[in-house]
Structures are given as C-alpha cells and as structure tokens.
Image (cartoon, grey):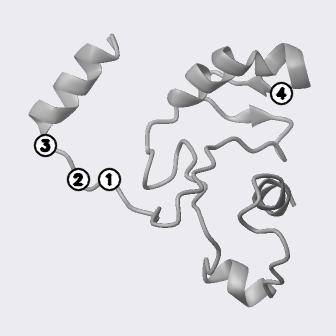
Amino acid sequence: MLHKRIREEWNYGRGESLSVEDLIKERYRGIRPAPGYPAQPDHTEKRTLFNLLDAENQVGIQLTESFAMMPASSVCGLYLSHPDAQYFSVGRIDRDQLEDYAERRRCP
C-alpha cells in the first residue's frame, strides 16, 4: 500500500494498474531496498534511519537489541524512484573488507 501511495504521490506511478503478478515480478518503476536484505545486508543501518527520522517518537516503532522492529508488522526501507534503478545484491566480501567496514562503523 505504501509503495503504491509513494509512486502516485511522487507522480511516477499515477494511473498505473499493476496486477499482483506484475508487483511480484517487480514490473514497476523504482526499487525499495531495506536493511537486512541483499542490497543492504547490515541490519544496524536501521538505527541510522530511526535516528534520522526520530521513528521511535514519531510513530512508536521500537528496535530490539538485534534490530528487529516492534511491532513485528513494521517495515523500514528506502524508496528510489529513478527509472533505471534495479535491485542488486551485495556479494560475498573478504575478511579485509569486513574488517575495514567494521572499523569505519566503529564496531568492536
């Protein structure tokens, strides 16, 4: 519902009539990557979004220690509307990349 609303309000999906199959096959413009999925595998990025949006105070969604959202029906992600945007996966990374990322994120 929110994806449809955003496409209409941002004026790039207005008037489209996509079937459930079209939605499942991602036959719409734009993408909706979210923390914890292949394009953005680091769940800790939810904290960044929550802080920027003041989500806990604004809408009452809480993050657990493991970055699950409560209530469980909650979702968070990014909307990218560019016509050439495509879903992608971050592939396997080597140990040196993991260590570099952890250092930049100041992870223990």
In the foreground, 7 or 1: 7
Place of residue 53 in the rendered image (x, y in percent of width and height, measured from the top left): 72, 20
| Badge 2: residue crowd in 10 Å (few <14, some 14–19, many ≥20) | few
Task: Please give the name of the residue rendered at 53% of the width and 58% of the height, measured from the top-left corner.
Answer: 82
- Tell me the mark number nearer the camera, choosing from 1 and 2: 1
Seen as rendered, the residue at the extreme front is 11
In the foreground, 76 or 10: 10
Q: Is residue 80 above or below residue 60?
A: below
Q: Is label 4 in a helix, a strand or a loop?
A: loop
Q: What's the residue type where badge 3 is placed?
A: Asp
Query: Can you identify the residue that label 2 sits on?
Result: 92
Query: Can you identify the residue that label 4 sits on?
Result: 61
Q: Is label 3 in a helix, a strand or a loop?
A: loop
Query: Can you identify the residue that label 1 sits on?
Result: 90
Place of residue 38 in the rendered image (x, y in percent of width and height, measured from the top left): 43, 55
Q: Are marks 1 and 3 in contact (CB under 8 Å)?
A: no
Q: Is label 1 in a helix, a strand or a loop?
A: loop
Q: What's the residue type where badge 1 is placed?
A: Val
Q: Are marks 4 and 3 in contact (CB under 8 Å)?
A: no
Q: In whole angstroms, how far apart are the C-alphas of marks 4 and 1? A: 27 Å
Task: Please give the name of the residue rendered at 45% of the width and 66% of the height, measured from the top-left corner.
Answer: 84
Quarter of the image with the C terminus is: top left
Q: In whole angstroms, how far apart are the C-alphas of marks 3 and 2? A: 7 Å
Query: Can you identify the residue that label 3 sits on?
Result: 94
Q: Are marks 3 and 2 in contact (CB under 8 Å)?
A: yes
Place of residue 79 in the rendered image (x, y in percent of width and height, measured from the top left): 63, 49
| Badge 4: residue crowd in 10 Å (few <14, some 14–19, many ≥20) | some
Q: Quadrant of residue 76?
A: top right
